[in-house]
Amino acid sequence: MSLSLSLTINGAARDIPLDDPRVTLLDLLRERLALPGTKKGCDRGQCGACTVLIDGHRVNACLTLAATLDGAKITTIEGLADGESLHPVQSAFIEHDGFQCGYCTPGQIMSAVGLIAEGQAGDDPERIREGMSGNICRCSAYHGITLAVQDATRRMATAEKDDAA
Amino acid sequence: MKLFDFIQPATIDEALSAWRPGAAWLGGGTNLVDLMKTGAMQPDAVIDITRLPGLDRIETLPDGSTRIGALVRNATLAHDRDFAAAYPMVAEALLSGASGQLRNVATVAGNLLQKTRCPFFQEPAALCNRRDPGAGCDAMAAPGNSAILGWSDACIATNPSDFTVPLVALEAVAEVRGPQGMREIAVADLQPLPGSTPERDTALEPGELILALRLPARARSFAAHARYLKVRERTSFAFALASAAAALRIEGGLIAEARLALGAVAAKPWRLAEAEAMMTGKAPDAALFAEVAEAVLAMANSPDGQKWKIDLARNTAARALSMAAAGTPARIPALPASPFGTRIEDPQHV
């Protein structure tokens, strides 16, 4: 079986031949496109380490068959920073110690970016914790993660206001 | 994962004619792809229906009913302001299920058709009549979070969907199309009880496809007093041990009409008309709700004789009714459907 995909990955258009419909987006990124920033934890949608954005929405890349994605825009952790300048969520994770070993961090950050864009949690810590429950941190850095998401939410809202002014 | 033919039809007609025995419809894939990885499901063909046109709309029909396209994502429906205002316990149930990532992908029709989370069904090395008819049931020796109503010697699995529970309480129907044309199935009839054929876990015939769900206009009349309560092992991202969708239409201080469906207690949401009727014309009151909960669970028994789940389901039902009587919060609580929380918009929090 031969399938061909057109994807925009981190802003770059790519044509990707696919010889097997079983390939998940996670394996496509890591094994075939040299983008290993997206992590494989459980591979069953339970840990969130593989979280990426598809057309702006956070999803588990491990449960998404690549063959279904023709035409999609994918954003991974590699596509978040603007050159040397970190995304506000990335900076906030560093400032608030939102990680320890770091393995779940790309997924945490992508999930936080998605959550903030959804606009349902605001800076309410309880809504942030609920909204981030699809991302497991085995080091249990949850307190720092919540503070980081809260801080980034506020900073991004302020930046948006400044942009509008 | 077993290799499969991947088929991407462009129209509903193409999809229906592409179906063949051994094929599986692929919506969001959050359940199917997972089960294909464990080997619990091994379709020969996967038909990707996510590109079928016209199935992603939420519409209000002229008669006031709401039609939800099969491919509407769980998150989209739950966050639709008009929908959540009209059917708050449906939105709350949706937001109490899975994670943000999964809700962004999972479709409403797929939610209804998801497989049981019985661990013995998911593990191909275990014996399971539902997965492998006639094989036996390993769950029977270690029932855990099993059914306490409507189970059989062949299967004690529960239906894991939160969404289905308020849909059954509100008498939603599924619009289905298949080789024989269109038909409608009450969501309450979509999941058969196991009996001696637990492998028949849906009332859909082979090759049939859900195109939409419809909530009747009358279901809006409960909006002011409707809650979903879900008790689980952790507050978020966990399946229910027991849940209840409770809705009351209160007029002049009395209950004009009541709806109650329980989740995680059977292979389908459990609704008992006699128990609902006990509330008609009465004032909302904790003692009444305790009697109603007692009545709903009167026939319950667990495969291992344990009482904890029956007690939990009874308390969950009574508390959900009390929460509904207290009124639908203006905004869905920070911890949807949870008995916990510190939010002032949750009037039940002590």
Image (spheres, coloured by chain):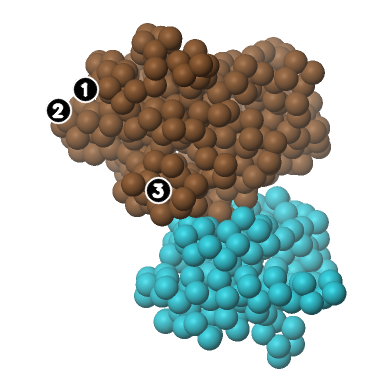
Furthest toward the right, the residue is A165
Residue A25 seen in the current view: no
Mark closer to the chain start, 1 or 3: 3
Q: Where residue B177 sits: x, y (%)?
A: 69, 20
Q: Colour of chain B?
A: brown
On the image, which quarter does residue B139 sit in? top left
Horizontally, residue B47 falls left or right of residue A49, namely: right
Residue B14 seen in the current view: yes
Q: Residue drawn 62% across and 70% down?
A: A153
Q: Residue drawn 64% across and 45% down?
A: B79
Tag 1, which secondary structure?
Answer: loop
The disc placed on residue B305 is 2
Q: Residue drawn 66% across and 18% down?
A: B217
Q: Say what amino acid the circle numbered 3 marks.
A: Ala
Tell me if residue B128 comes above or below residue B181 in the rendering: below
Answer yes or no: are tags 1 and 3 on the same subunit: yes
Tell me if residue B166 comes above or below residue A86 in the rendering: above
Q: CA distance from mark 2 to mark 3?
A: 24 Å
The disc placed on residue A51 is none
Q: Where residue B93 sits: x, y (%)?
A: 50, 38
Q: Where residue B308 sits: x, y (%)?
A: 19, 35
Answer yes or no: are tags 1 and 2 on the same subunit: yes
Tag 3, which secondary structure?
Answer: loop
Q: Which residue is mark 1?
A: B301
